[in-house]
Amino acid sequence: MTREQPRLRSQLLTWLLVPLALLLIADAFVSYWIALEFSRRAYDRSLIEIAHEISLHLRGPAEALELDLPEAARRVLLTDPSDRIYFGVSSADGRAIAGVAVPAPSGKIVHGPHAEALYDAVIGNAPVRVVEYRPDLDGRSRQRAVVVRVAETEVKRRDLAREILLSVVAPQVLLVLLAGLIVWAGVAHGLSPLERLRKAVASRKPYDRSPVEVTDIPAEVRPLLQSINGLLGRLDRVLTAQSRFVADAAHQLKTPVAGLQAQLELALRQQDTAQMRASIGMLQKGLDRLARLVSQLLSLARNEPAAAISVRLAPIDLNALALEAASSWVPEALAKSIDLGFEGASAPVMIEGDAERLRELMDNLLDNAVRYTAPGGRVTLTVSATPLPSMSVNDDGPSIPSEERARVFERFHRLLGTRYDGGSGLGLAIAQEIARIHGTSIALADDSDGIGNAFSVTFPFPGKTEARDLDSM
Ligand SMILES: Nc1ncnc2c1ncn2[C@@H]1O[C@H](COP(=O)(O)OP(=O)(O)OP(=O)(O)O)[C@@H](O)[C@H]1O
Ligand SMILES: [Mg+2]
């Protein structure tokens, strides 16, 4: 089962909407609580005033107090359109003086400005708010002998609470919904360049490697577009190189194969054995040349950037490898009376490399040097460790003109007048690809003695080859 990938849009919405909603809910809660608290205080104050008013109507000495509350005053004080108001006056020791029994304080008590106690209680199943007031009747007595309690049912308090709830919370809910809509629209708008980019990439034809164009792309998304285009560019280079290779190979193989067919037909028509032998000898030469061409083409394919990505470089001794290569070319050089020398370093020269490929690079350079140097000339393979590990092949062949120095590394490019006709112009191209795999390139200069050419390769410090950038090829 694949886990569903988190979607950017829902993530953004969650991160924006949930905190926003929580904030608004908290705000509604606080506003509601504050409004309720203020209205409770206002109602409590009017309850306190009633208690004070009643206490003003107490008459007589402390032991025999009476309440003298005229009917008219009683009506004004104790009548309310929505609530019932109860009062009770008793002595400090609990003797009832007037009114009904109102419960004594219990639970949470709030104190009023003149030491009144305000608390919640129940009278006949109905919740009530009560104020208890102990008036100082003669202004002197420290022991206040009378307790006045006034209780009021909570109908209008509840009504008000409901009204406040509606008037505070309803707009907040509306605000949450509106904010949600705005955030939703904002996120959709903000993500639209990504959607356009997705469409532009998705609607590509399989072989279209031109850069993706999306207008009005924000700065944050531009690097993504640039990376996609960079990738397309690299893909284009690799695919172009590959199709060029296939075209080159087809073109280069066609002629020798046709030649071989013609030679074979000629040989078959020969009656004379000696002539037939001569034809077969030609055929063999042609086959050898074809075999070399095929192996060179394969080598080129093997060393192309796309194929070379998987090459693993390992520490090897450049000095030993070069000595081996030079030794193997001695018989060839001797046959041409060429003095092939090796000037190695005194100690191993370690580099990060691929031995088989480096050997091919040396072989190709030595092959050219021995081939194009006239008999009696000198070819020297040098390896040195400082300042950086390097190798060079110096020869006495015809100097390659400076305007041709870059071109000889191109595929199938051969200098005009090159006499040897067995080559196909791939040796240096292959060598250059191998150098690139090693994070370097082959440099071509005049030989230090002024005669011939010097092909040299300088290797980066061991460990630095990791930095080779196949992408930039
Ligand atoms: N050491 C050299 N001295 C003089 N000319 C050279 C030398 N090396 C290369 N060249 C010139 O550069 C051309 C390209 O060399 P490259 O090795 O790529 O191909 P090639 O030798 O012609 O064929 P092959 O594919 O068999 O190597 C050669 O044809 C030759 O003209
Ligand atoms: Mg060559």
Image: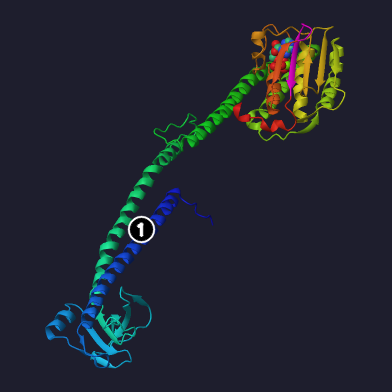
On screen, 309 above or below 455?
A: below
On screen, 265 above or below 212?
A: above
- In the current view of this chain or complex, which residue is farthest to the front? 140
Residue 39 found in image quarter: bottom left
User: Residue 191: percent from the left, percent from the top?
Assistant: 41, 43
Q: Which residue is mark 1?
A: 24
Q: Counting other residues with Cα less than 10 Å from the Cα at mark 1, is it few (<14), some (14-19), or many (20 or more)?
A: some
Q: Secondary structure at mark 1?
A: helix
**In front of the other: 158 or 348:** 158
Residue 376 found in image quarter: top right
Quadrant where ligand 2 appears: top right
User: Residue 41: percent from the left, percent from the top?
Assistant: 28, 70
Residue at 33% in and 92% down:
93
Circle count = 1
Q: Which residues are magenta?
A: 447-458
Is residue 402 toward the left or the right of residue 383 in the image? left
Residue at 87% in and 23% down:
346
Q: Is residue 189 visible?
A: yes
- Name the amino acid, label 1: Leu
**In front of the other: 345 or 34:** 34
User: Residue 334: percent from the left, percent from the top?
Assistant: 87, 13
Instruction: State which quarter of the image contains the N terminus.
Output: bottom right
Is residue 118 toward the left or the right of residue 315 in the image? left
Question: Ligand 1 closer than 8 Å to the CB at disc 1?
Answer: no
